[in-house]
Image (cartoon, rainbow, N blue to C red):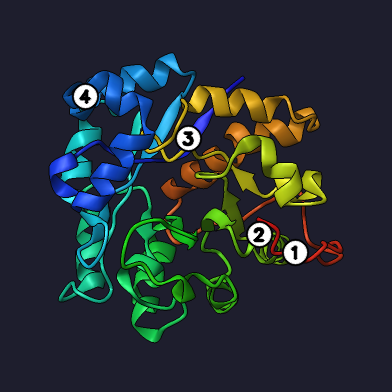
Amino acid sequence: MRVLDFHTHPWRPADLAAATRAFIEDISPAVREHGERLSDPVYAAELLRAEGIERAVVLPEHCPATSGVVRTEAVLAHCAAAPDVLLPFASVDPVSDPDPPALLRDYIAAGARGLKLYPSYQFFYPNEPRVYPLYEACAEAGLPVLLHIGSSVIPGTRLKYCDPIHLDDVAVDFPTLPIVMAHGGRGYWHAECAFLAHHHANVWIDVAGLVPEQLPRLFPPFEPVAEKMLFGSDWPAMPRGPGANAETIAGLGLPAATLAGLLHDNAAAILDATARAGGAEIATSAGNASGPPELPRTTDR
């Protein structure tokens, strides 16, 4: 079973807001067991390998108003120590950075494999004109954009910025840009995220922060939604290891091809396409030639 984790974080407690750090220390067995050793990228990569993770995207978190400031420079250096496992993304703040597009282009030139944005932590709507130059930079380089879409326990976050409907504009205006909705609308917008993922070939859901046993209940009917999903764990900010989550998903009864796509192949195709500058046509096993299937609309938690 091949597993690519599209959503992990480095453990850099000094860079996190106090509430963020306390939350992770409270829920994370990995942090409690390994402590400061977890900050060593080689050690962290070995732990992920032991969990059965082939490759892992590592996310910076430039959110000075809320969760903390884990800058892209730190993540690039972190991943350079274990490049066979760890894949660096960039993070810029459209609100506080003086020239976000120029900064992002510098990060792309330095080896960033994608962009992580935090609308509810950074206080912007994803379809604001000021954010479009960031999407343009990613589309030109063939890089995906991962956005936090869902609830959060971090003090000060504002949920209104996470409404996935704002991504409809982005998907229409950047049809070759891979757009990934982290957390799949956790707690509030599961059906909306499922509909957008089926409606747009370039829109995907990552399952980080969701209880894997509950996925069929959160996204009914599950099998067609699962075809547009990527595995993510939010490691180390999770109550059990990513390997256990992947095993649970493997036991949900999905067809072999759908399961392989969710755990590895969908993410691998998106990441491997980054070598083709200018973006590539996004293929999906689900397809959308006949329009999205009827999906029950629900805000069930």
Residue count near mark 3 (Cα–Cα under 10 Å), binned few <14, some 14–19, many ≥20: many
Quadrant (top left/top right/bottom left/bottom right) for the C terminus: bottom right
Residue count near mark 1 (Cα–Cα under 10 Å), binned few <14, some 14–19, many ≥20: some
Among the two numbered marks 1 and 3 on one chain, the one whose residue lies closer to the N terminus: 3
Element carrying mark 4: helix
Q: Is residue 203 visible?
A: yes
Residue 298 is labelled as 1
Residue count near mark 4 (Cα–Cα under 10 Å), binned few <14, some 14–19, many ≥20: few
**Amino acid carrying mark 2 in the image:** His
Among the two numbered marks 2 and 3 on one chain, the one whose residue lies closer to the N terminus: 3
Residue at (29%, 28%) from the top-left corner?
31
Among the two numbered marks 2 and 1 on one chain, the one whose residue lies closer to the N terminus: 2
**Residue 279, x across and y down, in percent:** 49, 59
Q: In the rendered view, would you say 27 is above or below 126?
A: above
Among the two numbered marks 4 and 3 on one chain, the one whose residue lies closer to the N terminus: 3
Q: Nearer the viewer, residue 254 or 136?
A: 254
- Residue beneath label 2, please? 190
- Residue beneath label 4, please? 35
Give the CA separation, mark 2 to mark 1. 7 Å
